[in-house]
Amino acid sequence: VKERVTHYFGPIPKGEAKPPAPKGEVTRGRKVEKQLSDDKAQQTQWIWAWPTVGDDHPDRPALELLGNVLFGGESARVPKIMSDEKKWTAFSFGGHIFGFREAGGMLFLGVPTEEGEKHLDDVKATLLAEVDKVAKKGISAKELEKAVNQQLMQSVSTLATNQGRAMAVANGAAFYNDPKRVLTDLDRYSKVTAKDIQRVAQTYINGDWIFYELVPAGKAGAPAPAATATTEAKK
């Protein structure tokens, strides 16, 4: 590989040094809730987000495992309640989706059923109660093991293809000077304890969330779409 890279890219002169990237800032401790209308939306969607930390922050592995416990898959705590027990969502998922270098976010997304749309306040209360339960009581050893195994399977999936391996090596080498970062990350996950997950739940995931409800235009509480020139002409 090195020989081919040198052959094709070696003669290209090195460019000027890049200026340092601006530092990202994360604002926590505020609650934002909005309803947005979209004239192309076919059904309502819910999105919750909690600002967290960047990819290289020491709390990131624990947050990712917390995301698996709360939101990662149909059998995770919150989707199981929302979809299986309460029937408030037809589909829901989430996790510590965004982990940029200096900022990140925990997300939970749901497509509500008609019954769920009637009980949005109950949905929010149930979500907050489940988050608080982890913060106050922690998680079981079985949940921790399952969350770590989910990360292991993600790494296996990444390394299963040439493209996945190339991207993992490039990302680790370019940003962290660690071509094997996808593997060393597994060591970080294996060192996370149930107490670590409880601590990050207390620190980052609470009722101070950002919530957006995306609804079809014209639905109750949503403004109707603006009239187009064609519509006006027909009148």
Image (cartoon, grey):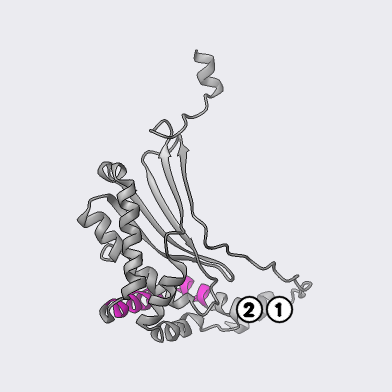
Residue type, numbered disc 1: Gly
Residue at 67% from the left image edge and 68% from the top image edge: 23
Q: Is residue 126 left or right of residue 231?
A: left
Residue tagged 1: 10
Kind of residue at disc 2: Val
Q: Where is residue 39 in the image (x, y as percent from the top left)?
A: 45, 34
**Does residue 161 show up?**
no
Q: Main secondary structure of the magenta part?
A: helix
Lateral position of residue 209 relative to residue 145, left or right: right
Q: Do the residues labelled 2 and 1 touch (CB within 8 Å)?
A: yes
Residue 105 appears in the rendering: yes
The relative height of residue 155 versus residue 225 in the rendered view (above or below) is below
Residue 68 located within the stretch drawn in magenta: no
Kindly report the distance in space between the C-alpha atoms of the residues bearing marks 2 and 1: 7 Å
Determine which quarter of the picture holds residue 72. bottom left
Classify mark 1: residues with Cα within 10 Å, few (<14), some (14-19) or many (20+): few
Q: Residue 5 carries which label?
A: 2
Residue 71 appears at what percent x and percent y?
Answer: 34, 64
Task: Please give the range of residues in magenta.
Answer: 143-168
Indicate the quadrant where residue 157 lies: bottom left
x then y, percent, for residue 29: 52, 62
Residue furthest to the right: 16
Residue plotted at (63% across, 66% down): 24
